[in-house]
Structure formats: structure tokens, C-alpha cells
Amino acid sequence: MKNHRILTTVAALGASALVLTGCSAGVSGAGYDGKVTIDFWSWAPNTHQLVDVWNE
């Protein structure tokens, strides 16, 4: 029973480490200038006004 609890704890810690590694920022530098382009499509009218406010 004790070995089962230890194995479960180790497995949970390993899974948590994998999830947190996926959320890391990665290597900085390497040509990143801070600008990002997102293509946004919408069927709603006047969405460009919302996008303009977002980009301010």
C-alpha cells in the first residue's frame, strides 16, 4: 500500500512537470522583436472597431 502511494505521488509530480514545461516561455532572443500578427475573421458587423480599440 505504501509503495502504491509513493508511485502515485511520483506519477502526479511527473505529470505536473510535463504540463508546466508546456507552459514555459521558451528560449528568449532568437530574433523575437515583440510584435505578433493575428489574423482575425468575423461574420459580425463593425468588428473592425473592436479590433481598433484592442490594438490601442
Image (cartoon, grey):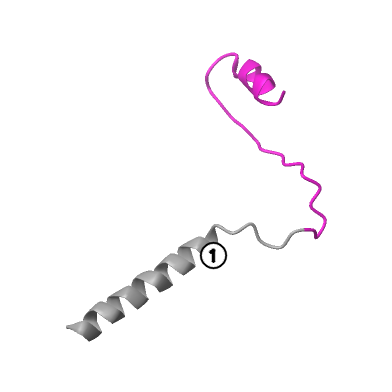
Q: Quadrant of residue 53?
A: top right
Identify the residue at image location x=65%, y=36%. 39
Q: What residue do we see at 35% from left, 70% from top?
A: 12
Q: On screen, 52 above or below 25?
A: above
Give the residue type that dot 1 points to: Thr
Q: Which residue was labeled with disc 1?
A: 21
Position of 33 with respect to 24 (left or right) is right
SS at mark 1 in the image: helix
The residue depicted at 60 percent of the width and 14 percent of the height is 46
Q: On the picture, is 17 further left or further right than 33?
A: left
Residue 14: x percent and y percent? 42, 73
Whole-percent x, y for residue 42 in the image = 55, 26
Q: Residue furthest left?
A: 1
Estimate the x, y position of residue 56 in percent, counting from the top left.
72, 23
* Image quadrant assignment for residue 40: top right
Q: Is residue 10 above or below residue 43?
A: below
Residues in magenta?
Answer: 29-56
Q: Residue furthest front?
A: 2
Q: Is residue 46 magenta?
A: yes
Q: How many numbered discs?
A: 1
Question: Is residue 23 shown left or right of residue 16?
Answer: right
Rendered-image quadrant of the N terminus: bottom left
**In the rendered image of this protein, does residue 24 appear above or below residue 55?**
below
Compared across the picture, whether 54 is left or right of 42 comes to: right
Q: Nearer the viewer, residue 5 or 22?
A: 5
Give coordinates of residue 9: x percent, y percent. Answer: 32, 74
Disc 1 crowd rating (10 Å Cα; few below 14, some 14-19, many 20+) is: few
